[in-house]
Amino acid sequence: MAITKEHSPAARTSVDTARPPNARNKIRTLAQLSELSREVRADGGRVVMAHGVFDLLHMGHLRHLEEARQLGERLIVTVTPDRYVNKGPGRPVFTEFVRAEMVAALDCVDWVGINTTPSADPAIALIQPDCYVKGPDYADADADVTGKISEEKRAVESYGGRLVITNDVTFSSSELINRHLNRFTPKVRSFLDTLANDESRGNIADMLDRVAGMRVLVVGDLIIDEYRYVTPMSKTPKEHLIATLYQSSELFAGGVVATANHVAGICKEVEVLTVAGGRDDFLDFVEQNKKPNVALNALSREGGPTTRKCRYVDVNYLRKLFEVYDMDDSPLSPALEQELNARIRRIAKDFDVVIVNDFGHGMIMPATVDALASSARFLAINTQTNSANFGFNVISKYPRANYICIDGAEARLAARLQHADTAELVEELSHIIDCPNFVVTQASQGALAWARGESVSIVPAFADAVLDTVGAGDAFLAITAPLVATGGSLREIAFVGNVAGALKVGIVGHRQSIDRVSLVKAITALLK
């Protein structure tokens, strides 16, 4: 019998001379895969590597991996870890360990590893495959919104390897999941089907392209969000208190900075205009935690602190137990208010969009409202109702805006209508405030969108797992405000906002911000 390279002594390595007894035995760490790859190559064998999510294993995956296996003696597959899967709310459907084991069960796959980073570059550098294989969807590098295929190509070619694109049958895991796993209610599925059948996908892509070069000014309260993670114990013997055991803490740049970081994910240039405390200003911390394309323009309020909201969180379930505010929410001094208003009048006109994050903590009073309303070319506003200002910080204090985004409770307080439905609230507010575009967010009930001269649109929510609701409304505002400035369909924009909100509720605090890549991938997955 002729000896082929597949059966030649050179192709046999000191590892894995027999098939593993089960799929789990094929799953190795990246360090182990690096050593296995080195041994195979030392014995004259060729190593092929593939990488992906593999959320729902299908025929396209099988053909892709079988074709990859023909390029060498050993096929290594790395799987994207759960925390880096950018496929939208509710994804991945299956955990990284389940996905890895399913891939390992394929006869054509020799070893599987779970990646530890957002991209495959570090794994490629460790494993150093002779061939790195991607599917036909990546044949056009310019069409890859993540830009990762170009980085992966550079990584594999840096040591003499090559990128290979397979060309067999393709399927979409996202489309199969959307159609057959019943992730959404019939009402939500119907909305997505309607949107997918319209020209919405192209319209949204066009709007995102148009906002990419925008300059955005974000005005509002600087807030430091602190999470103190604790373990609840039991009631104290002598007081009616529940004791907790401190575990750790985490600080986030919240308020106007969190909003700016979201905007910076889709727009070219963002500036923050805010007021910090004269003591405990946290400005060094903010500088370290803002995105590179966010500029900080902060005035100082003598004597007072930068607003800090400390939330005590059950570390086991990430449930918030209570919170403590450290702030001075009295109005700014006349001199500081004049300086703030002068800056607004001087710079606001230079920006395509001005977003106002009004948390009602003393920064934005009537004279500042006038400065914003008279200076901004396109004015987008949210007035937040919270435990410090309930009933006092309402959107009706602004005489005009181009876009208003508030939640249902904030709309009811402003319209003074406790029991009216949301459509009635928007109609009433449209008589109070000169504004052509309103969105009222309603948590799990989705969002209501109203544009002057058009009928009301109801856009459903897409989040099916809520980790943390803090900042979800700010993410909605941040992503949608520049899109509204393009003149696009408010129904389509509210859909994008709900996608951003769904992504945000899967993030603890402000550990991450929404960016164009995660947004586009989530939208694409939902509309397949």
Image (cartoon, rainbow, N blue to C red):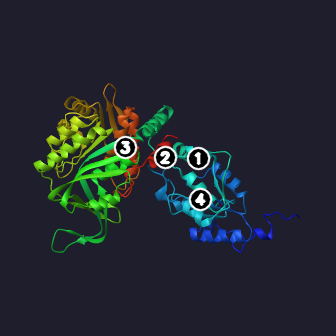
Q: Earlier in the sequence, mark 1 or mark 2?
A: 1
Tell me the residue that label 3 is attached to: 479
Disc 1/disc 2 C-alpha distance (Å): 16 Å
Q: Do the residues bearing badges 1 and 2 touch, measured as CB atoms within 8 Å? A: no
Q: Residue furthest top?
A: 453
Disc 1/disc 4 C-alpha distance (Å): 15 Å
Name which residue type carries label 4.
Ala
Q: Secondary structure at mark 4?
A: helix
Tell me the residue that label 4 is attached to: 155
Q: Earlier in the sequence, mark 4 or mark 3?
A: 4
Name which residue type carries label 2.
Lys
| Horizontal side of residue 192 vs 132, given as left or right | left
Is residue 501 something one can see in this rendering?
no
Say which of marks 4 and 2 sits in front: 4
Q: Quadrant of residue 247?
A: bottom left
Tell me the residue that label 2 is attached to: 521
Residue at 19 percent of width and 58 percent of height: 277
Q: Earlier in the sequence, mark 3 or mark 2?
A: 3
Q: Residues within 10 Å of mark 2 (few under 14, many from 20)?
A: some
Q: Earlier in the sequence, mark 1 or mark 3?
A: 1
Tell me the residue that label 1 is attached to: 141
